[in-house]
Image (cartoon, helix red, strand yellow):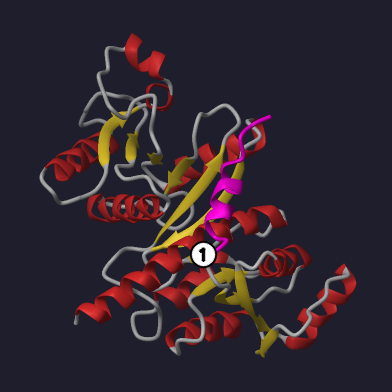
Amino acid sequence: MTKNHYQELLQLCKNIPPVPTAVVHPCESSALQGALEAAELGLIDPILVGPEQKIKSVAQEAGLDLGNYRIESVEHSHAAAKRGVELVREGRAAMMMKGSLHSDELLSAVASSSTGLRTARRLSHVFAMNVPSYHKPLFITDAAVNIAPNLDEKADICRNAIDLLKVLGIDRPKLALLSAVETVTAKLPSTLEAAALVVMSHRGQIEGGILDGPLAFDNAINAEAARIKGIVSEVAGDPDVLVVPDLESGNMVAKQLIYLAGAQAAGIVLGARVPIVLTSRSDPAPARISSCVLCVLLADAQQKQAASALVKN
């Protein structure tokens, strides 16, 4: 049986109190079920944000028990995204969870320069993959938020991924910077950016990880393929993170692993004030649970870091 890395992470959440979470517009059975199951597992304390009657109707049709969970009633999905962000800004929520609204609608509210949850970092998405044929968890970034990131944005994408993996107990995450080839060529700008990111990591501009690239997918993921091509690398054949050139390529890689290789995927957004569960509307409830696990661990680490900073001051 394939090792389930998510179950290992779930055990790490045992001693963490349920995290207050704004569940934004859970107006579809899978979205609502995922939030309620996460609550039953003790991961989150959900605040259901959306049209109250619609949420209750979905629950009734799906046979779900809303219990005493709080509902913040708003008229529609746009208002739900705005109210979810407000709950974080008010200190009532330490996590957000996407329901059945479109990702752009939620992220627009999060990224607002005046009323959102922006930090100095670029927002980025990470797929956490449990791939049956791979020997450890595999993370892919960014396959859902940044369409065609430039060099500075890719640097933040790397930093966000490194911070996440450190929370998960990986001290020196290995990042493979993907392109179509493993040689640097001006004909493929992604190879130039990969090489620049490696230099940035060597000079302390990107800290905490081991970066290598450009690497093609085969020699990034397979040590024998790297050996045949004469690539000597700490990363090739053993990456923790695949950093993709753009959203299109990343989305295709992630979904090929899900639908052709039987991978399980969790999806979260990093770089905001709080971690955000961001899964597809077609994803099953278990994918939302796995995403919650990652966000809970990250939210707990952020809260401990903030508490430590207060003590020092």
Residue range (magenta)? 1-15
Give the image location of residue 164, x and y in percent: 39, 55
- Label 1, residues with CA under 10 Å away: few <14, some 14-19, many ≥20: many
Give the image location of residue 273, x and y in percent: 38, 73
Is residue 113 within the magenta segment? no
Q: Residue furthest front?
A: 15
Residue 227, quarter of picture: top left
Where 1 falls versus 33 (above or below)?
above
Q: Is residue 216 left or right of residue 281?
A: left
Where 69 falls versus 9 (above or below)?
below
Q: Disc 1 residue type?
A: Val
Where 302 falls versus 286 (above or below)?
below
Is residue 2 within the magenta segment? yes
**Residue identified by numbered label 1:** 296
Residue 89, quarter of picture: bottom left
Residue at position x 46%, y 73% from top?
108
Give the image location of residue 260, x and y in percent: 65, 31
Front residue (pair 200, 253): 200
Label 1 SS: helix
Q: Residue 171: in sight, yes or no?
A: yes
Front residue (pair 102, 236): 236
Front residue (pair 53, 211): 211
Placement of the C terminus among the 4 image quadrants = bottom left
Front residue (pair 226, 92): 92
Q: Is residue 282 left or right of residue 236?
A: right
